Image (cartoon, grey):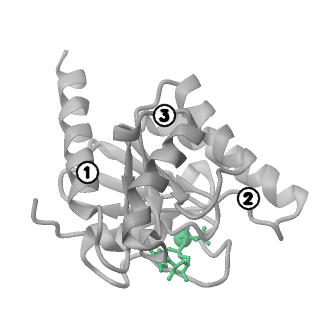
Amino acid sequence: MKIEASYLTSAVSPKGFLRTDKPIIAVAGKSNVGKSSFINMLAGRAKLARTSNTPGRTRMVNYFDFGPFVLADLPGYGFAKAGKAEREKWGKLMEAFFAEQGVAHVFSLFDIRHAPTKEDLQMVKYLYFYAIPFTAVATKADKLAKTRVKPRAAELAAQLGIAAGDLVATSAQTGRGKDEALERAEQAVQVFFEKTEQ
Ligand SMILES: Nc1nc2c(ncn2[C@@H]2O[C@H](COP(=O)(O)OP(=O)(O)OP(=O)(O)O)[C@@H](O)[C@H]2O)c(=O)[nH]1
Ligand SMILES: [Mg+2]
């Protein structure tokens, strides 16, 4: 799939949510896990989504057009420095997002090096509870020795309570997992249109 991605718009509140006929695929995960870098990898463009060493950089929903679908870069959860008010604001924004946007699919990101946090597990529970189809993505695979990636990915899938086949190991540095993730997105687009045609 040849990708021509471009920035669309950002939303700091539900008023700003994008109205589109295209399927929306959301990218979720804790702060600093590599959501924006993952989007840039899929786009084949280094600076489409803003990345940062400072966790909590993306505070709004950023939308990117990917041709057949729209990717939504979600603000990260588990940002240690966020105060209570900020966390509540984030929670409300996310609830509204999932309630109103009718997402076709979610890429749920986890750092391959770490055991899932309480919030990571909550995210997976949430996706199951609302029956939102998702693909788990293990980011920063380049930080492990090559031979460690597959066994660690399988272990992480088990920790998340999902099938090993539903987890893709990626690296924004090497491009590992890019094609597999794009295939997942393509499948999600197909399913979305099959559903809307019924
Ligand atoms: N080595 C390596 N570093 C990565 C990878 N993906 C992201 N990073 C680094 O991790 C840091 C955070 O990446 P971002 O893409 O900004 O993370 P994010 O999830 O969008 O963060 P927030 O927007 O703050 O929630 C940056 O320093 C990236 O360069 C990867 O695959 N490999
Ligand atoms: Mg980001």
Q: Residues within 10 Å of mark 3 (few under 14, many from 20)?
A: some
Give me the residue at 47% from left, 72% from top.
144
- Residue type at numbered disc 3: Ile
Ranked by sequence position, the earlier of labels 3 and 1 is 1
Residue, disc 2: 78
Image location (x, y in percent) of residue 35: 49, 65
- Residue type at numbered disc 1: Phe
Q: Nearer the viewer, mark 2 or mark 3?
A: 3
Instruction: Find out if the beta carbon at label 2 lies less than 8 Å from the nearest ligand 1 atom.
Output: no
Residue 58 left/right relative to 162: right
- Residue type at numbered disc 2: Gly
Q: Element type at marker 2?
A: loop
Q: Where is 158 relative to 117, above or below?
A: above
Q: Which quadrant would the C terminus be assigned to in this image?
A: top left
Q: Is residue 6 visible?
A: no
Image location (x, y in percent) of residue 79: 75, 65
Residue, disc 3: 162
User: Residue placed farthest to the right in the image?
Assistant: 84
Q: Is residue 44 visible?
A: yes
Residue 121 left/right relative to 45: right
Image location (x, y in percent) of residue 151: 44, 53
Give me the residue at 61% from left, 84% from top.
53
Residue, disc 1: 69
